[in-house]
Image (cartoon, rainbow, N blue to C red):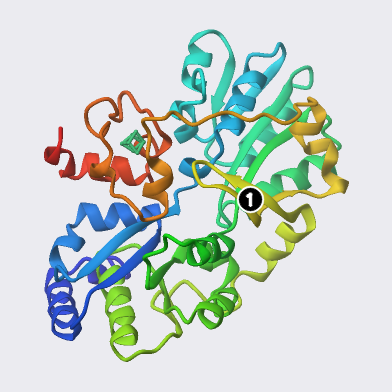
């Protein structure tokens, strides 16, 4: 299959790994931002193909993992209200809130429905005029255009029973927050290809310039990631810091301009709390004033909530590349995909789930 087989070719992968080993003369710490990339690394054992002096740490690019506990609790509260239909992506149903999760709420009789796109939630609103439909709109820049389109569509149709509980996060401010942190160990980043398909890669130039850190936009197949690692190693060994695009078959410098346009029309940049990490300035999106009627926070007068993370879960450190999932005492013991304590063990993009599914639970489990 074109654009797939060649990116899973063992021979090409081994040749890239050999060149990486030959060019690496010092210790380097690299971070892949996206949870999808983490899963590829674990699934294909890419970290084990690399020299010991090259450490891959996993970043905060799992949308489910960084959705604040407070948002889950708000979704739970809404789901249990009369006449509400709570619509969500499937991954979110098992993410633990502070007391329960949406799957349990559903079992208790709450009308919680799974959707594969936000337009399904608009459709549910259209066909249930006597109910209030709330879509749990989470994610990075990748899902923001579709969520923006749903709000735009609902407003255009005058649907007064559709709203969104929004928790959108942006990648570049998260990289900036990692770089200014006193505990940062990361010396080069693999930026998330899907996000850059929408946003382009131009917005990463400022990070490269401000922190003199190499950034390579990377894809999601094994050969993509090995190529991205090689590009980073070449820069680091040469003392360079540049923005490069390994995923050029999908990502342009400017990105998808119509998608960015609908995002800008519906959302505005705002401070955003990241689960486990805390508040990062201007790292999220909220609905603009013109879309207040679609904002579940306002429609249901939800107010502010502050909830403590479970003490046993070290996901904050995992999401910042400071610890590996197997460093967590609960990994594979008190915390498994069947009984998750934290979101990274639930999500299809969570680092803890990746380690658990692809053999690493043998380490402690
Ligand atoms: S293994 Fe479970 S408890 Fe530990 S960091 Fe991951 S999600 Fe949290």
Q: Which residue is mark 1?
A: 146
Residue 64 position, x and y percent, is 48, 41
Instruction: Answer left or right for 228 relative to 178.
Output: left
Q: Secondary structure at mark 1?
A: helix
Hey, which quadrant is residue 50 in on the image? bottom left
**Above-or-below relation of 362 to 241:** above
**Above-or-below relation of 191 to 244:** above
Q: Quadrant of the N terminus?
A: bottom left
The residue that appears at 75% across and 60% down in the rendered structure is 264
The residue that appears at 63% across and 50% down in the rendered structure is 146
Residue 299 position, x and y percent, is 81, 29
Instruction: Answer left or right for 310 relative to 10.
Output: right
Depth check: 103 or 362 in front? 362
Residue 101 position, x and y percent, is 49, 22
- Quadrant holding ligand 1? top left
- Which residue is the extreme one toward the bottom? 238
Q: Is mark 1 within 8 Å of ligand 1?
A: no
């Amino acid at each position: 299959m074109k654009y797939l087989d060649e990116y899973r070719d063992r021979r090409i992968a081994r040749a890239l790994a050999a060149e990486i080993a030959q060019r690496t003369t010092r210790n380097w710490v690299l971070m892949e931002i996206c949870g999808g990339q983490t899963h590829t690394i674990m699934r294909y054992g890419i970290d084990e193909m690399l020299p010991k002096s090259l450490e891959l740490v996993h970043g905060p690019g799992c949308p489910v993992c960084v959705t604040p506990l407070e948002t889950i609790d708000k979704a739970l509260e809404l789901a249990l209200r009369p006449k509400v239909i709570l619509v969500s992506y499937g991954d979110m149903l098992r993410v633990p809130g502070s007391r329960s999760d949406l799957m349990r709420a559903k079992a208790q009789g709450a009308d919680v429905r799974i959707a594969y796109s936000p337009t399904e939630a608009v459709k549910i609103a259209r066909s249930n005029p006597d109910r209030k439909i709330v879509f749990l709109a989470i994610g990075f820049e990748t899902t923001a255009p579709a969520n923006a389109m749903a709000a735009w569509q609902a407003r255009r149709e005058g649907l007064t029973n559709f709203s969104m509980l929004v928790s959108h996060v942006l990648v570049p401010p998260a990289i900036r927050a990692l770089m200014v942190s006193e505990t940062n160990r990361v010396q080069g980043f693999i930026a998330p290809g899907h996000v850059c398909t929408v946003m382009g890669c131009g917005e990463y130039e400022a990070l490269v310039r401000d922190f003199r850190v190499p950034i390579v936009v990377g894809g999601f197949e094994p050969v993509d990631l090995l190529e991205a690692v090689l590009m980073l190693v070449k820069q680091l060994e040469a003392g360079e810091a540049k923005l490069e695009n390994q995923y050029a078959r999908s990502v342009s410098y400017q990105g998808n301009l119509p998608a960015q346009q609908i995002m800008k029309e519906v959302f505005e940049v705002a401070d955003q709390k990241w689960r486990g990490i805390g508040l990062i300035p201007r790292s999220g999106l909220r609905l603009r004033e013109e879309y207040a009627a679609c904002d579940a926070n306002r429609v249901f007068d939800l107010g502010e909530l502050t909830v403590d993370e479970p003490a046993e879960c070290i996901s904050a450190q995992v999401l910042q590349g400071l610890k590996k999932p197997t460093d967590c005492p609960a990994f594979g013991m008190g915390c498994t995909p069947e009984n998750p304590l934290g979101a990274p063990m639930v999500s299809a993009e969570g680092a803890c789930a990746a380690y658990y599914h692809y053999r690493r639970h043998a380490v402690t489990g």
